[in-house]
Image (spheres, rainbow, N blue to C red):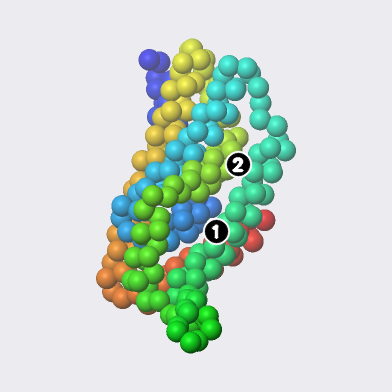
């Protein structure tokens, strides 16, 4: 392997490490992972996000390698704008979920009394237990879809350097994209480990701390989404 090619491939991995920690990526996965705080859950959300990001980059890179096609500017520009909309939606969803978990309506029917509703305030631990049971067989693909969007929006600078790796053979172009995606995954899993451990420590400190941080994450995500737009 030529030194210049080796440097380009090493650069791909390094770019992946840095790219994963872009502010919009961090805000999005933090909002997603905050719904089920914990190390295992954070690792799962961040890994799914990285898979979605890798799929977008590999598909777009494959089109460049096989067809010589170029992603139209309007596609990446539209994806960039959609990132801001999604961030606002994620932040609003976090705030709504906090409210939903704490307040719930129950409908009762007692003997001799018409059906009526009671508003009930759940403790955070009760709410998380109910959510865990209700989602045990569910499939949350939100993180993958957000990763796909981020991969599409941020693909232009990634693909710009790919021709340097293609100078040898097209295979090195594929290796370039794979190494970039591995760098993204590695960096995102490190971030997930820190995030998950922080969530677990906050949960042990008391439910109020965790809910407060979740509210802060939701508000910060909305604010960043507005700035992004």
In this view, 185 is above or below 211:
above
| Residue toward you, 122 or 204 | 122
Q: Secondary structure at mark 1?
A: helix
Q: Are marks 2 and 1 in contact (CB under 8 Å)?
A: no
Q: Is residue 82 visible?
A: yes
The crowding category of the residue bearing disc 1, from other C-alpha atoms within 10 Å (few below 14, some 14 to 19, many at least 20), is: many
Number of callouts in the render?
2
Residue at 38% x, 49% y: name it. 137
Viewport quadrant of the C terminus = bottom right
Report the mark closest to the observer, 2 or 1. Answer: 1
Residue 6 percent coordinates (x, y): 40, 22
| Residue toward you, 110 or 149 | 110
Residue 174 percent coordinates (x, y): 47, 22
In this view, 30 is above or below 101:
above
The crowding category of the residue bearing disc 2, from other C-alpha atoms within 10 Å (few below 14, some 14 to 19, many at least 20), is: many
Residue at 50% x, 49% y: name it. 142
Q: Is residue 183 left or right of residue 115?
A: left
Residue at 57% x, 56% y: name it. 87
Residue 2 percent coordinates (x, y): 40, 15
Q: Residue furthest top?
A: 169
> What residue sits right under mark 2 in the picture?
153
Q: Residue furthest front?
A: 112
Distance of label 2 from label 1 (alpha carbons)? 17 Å
Q: Which mark is residue 37?
A: none
> What residue sits right under mark 1 in the picture?
90
Q: Earlier in the sequence, mark 2 or mark 1?
A: 1
């Amino acid at each position: 392997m030529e030194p210049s090619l080796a440097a380009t491939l090493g650069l791909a991995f390094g770019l992946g490490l840095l790219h994963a920690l872009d502010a919009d990526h961090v805000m999005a996965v933090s909002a997603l992972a905050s719904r089920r705080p914990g190390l295992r859950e954070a690792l799962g959300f961040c890994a799914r996000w990285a898979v979605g990001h890798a799929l977008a980059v590999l598909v777009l890179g494959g089109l460049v390698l096989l067809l010589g096609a170029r992603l139209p500017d309007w596609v990446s520009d539209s994806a960039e704008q959609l990132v801001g909309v999604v961030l606002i939606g994620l932040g609003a969803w976090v705030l709504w979920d906090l409210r939903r978990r704490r307040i719930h309506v129950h409908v009762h029917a007692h003997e001799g009394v018409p059906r009526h509703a009671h508003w009930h305030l759940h403790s955070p631990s009760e709410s998380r237990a109910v959510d865990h049971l209700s989602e045990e067989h569910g499939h949350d693909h939100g993180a993958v879809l957000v990763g796909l969007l981020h991969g599409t929006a941020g693909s232009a600078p990634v693909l710009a350097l790919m021709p340097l790796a293609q100078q040898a053979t097209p295979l090195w172009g594929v290796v370039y994209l794979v190494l970039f995606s591995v760098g993204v995954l590695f960096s995102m899993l490190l971030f997930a480990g820190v995030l998950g451990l922080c969530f677990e420590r906050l949960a042990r400190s008391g439910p109020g701390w965790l809910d407060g941080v979740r509210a802060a994450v939701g508000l910060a995500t909305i604010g960043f989404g507005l700035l992004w737009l």
